[in-house]
Image (tube, grey):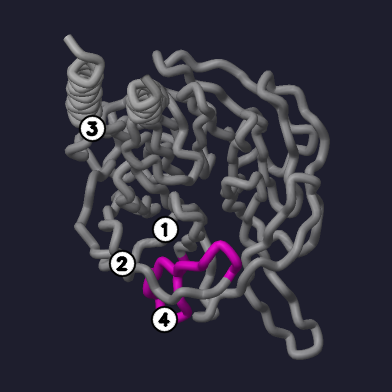
Amino acid sequence: MNSTLLRAIKYAFFRQLAVLGAMLLAICIISTPARASVLYAQYLDSHLVGSIIKFTPDGVGSVFASIPTANYANDIASDSAGNLYVGTRMSTIEKITPNGVVSDFATPTVWANGVGDSAIAFDNTNNLYLQQCRWIEKFSPTGTSLGMFATTQDLFPGGALSFDRAGNLYTKGIEVDHTNNTLTYTILKYTPDGVGSVFARSAYDAYPLALTFDRAGNLYMAETTNTGGTKIEKFSSSGTDLGVFANSVNNSSPVDIAFDSEGNLYMANQSGSIEKFSPSGIDLGVFGATNVDEDTGWSQYGSLWGITLVDDNSQSSQGLALAPEPSSTWALLALCVPVVFGMFRQRLRAA
């Protein structure tokens, strides 16, 4: 067999091998299920007993954990391991494992009438940040207080915290014009070192209530207007106001917003309902509600105080949409197949 024919046979063999590898890779990626998000809500019933409600993808809720001291808490957050955290009226932060086990996580250094009017968020290294009134305290992943992250009169009582991918912290603020006796609602941005600045101002002079980010880095703010309506305003990563993302058909006061892994936005209303919006801002109606008959163990006269979404790989959304992605293994294989094929082709040409 001459050398030219041998090279042609080798080339054809390795080419078919690379094609087969690419086909197997495509099948694996397609068959890999998308990461689904599980929604948890912090709920307070008419007996002032707190519960964590877990919702199925169809919006059916059930009691995941009970927290008797969680009355008046108004936020819930999750870390990268899928643990849930809530603040309580007894001035503690409670931790709930993925199995529903409740334990004390931390006690704030400053007690501000409990941590009922609070907000909780995690940075990308699992440090917890707690806002109470006009200060933000930082805690290590084990619950040790790391001191005050920020203290300012610009913070608006009743917090809302959200991190961007760069580790900057955002919360709602207020500017007071004592000369004209006017208030301006703002969004404040804090660098990882705690340096604060005004990130944006609402174009609608609306009352800010909740903040979250999408995967692209845009910031969303749920707010109630002076006329009683509820809007979700959208801002670019640089603070440019991009207008109204969605209008709520439910004029109940929103308490929290969060994205799922498919880019849908959920808004919890204090009245007990959770609205769902498409990635383009279309109101898809009520996703779930907590106004269930008390015979099931819930109070139909209670209220929601916060929501968080955790994907099925126990990774917290952290206010960011977790779009379905192939695993790093498949991504590595996708890079290796053409590289290996190219190396063989070069060797065959040189032979």
Q: Which residue is mark 1?
A: 254
Report the Cα–Cα distance between label 3 and label 1. 21 Å
- Image quarter of the N terminus: top left
Question: Answer yes or no: do the residues labelled 3 and 2 have beta carbons within 8 Å?
Answer: no
- Image quarter of the C terminus: top left
Residue 248, numbered label: 2
Q: Which residue is mark 3?
A: 56
In this rendering, is residue 128 above or below 257?
Answer: above
- How many neighbours does mark 2 have within 10 angstroms: few (below 14), some (14-19), or many (20 or more)? many
- How many neighbours does mark 1 have within 10 angstroms: few (below 14), some (14-19), or many (20 or more)? many
Question: Answer yes or no: do the residues labelled 2 and 4 have beta carbons within 8 Å?
Answer: no
Question: Answer yes or no: do the residues labelled 1 and 4 have beta carbons within 8 Å?
Answer: no
Among the 4 quarters of the image, the one containing residue 341: top left
Badge 2 marks a residue whose secondary structure is loop
Q: Which residues are magenta?
A: 223-239
Does residue 333 appear in this view? no
- How many neighbours does mark 3 have within 10 angstroms: few (below 14), some (14-19), or many (20 or more)? few
Q: Which residue is mark 4?
A: 227
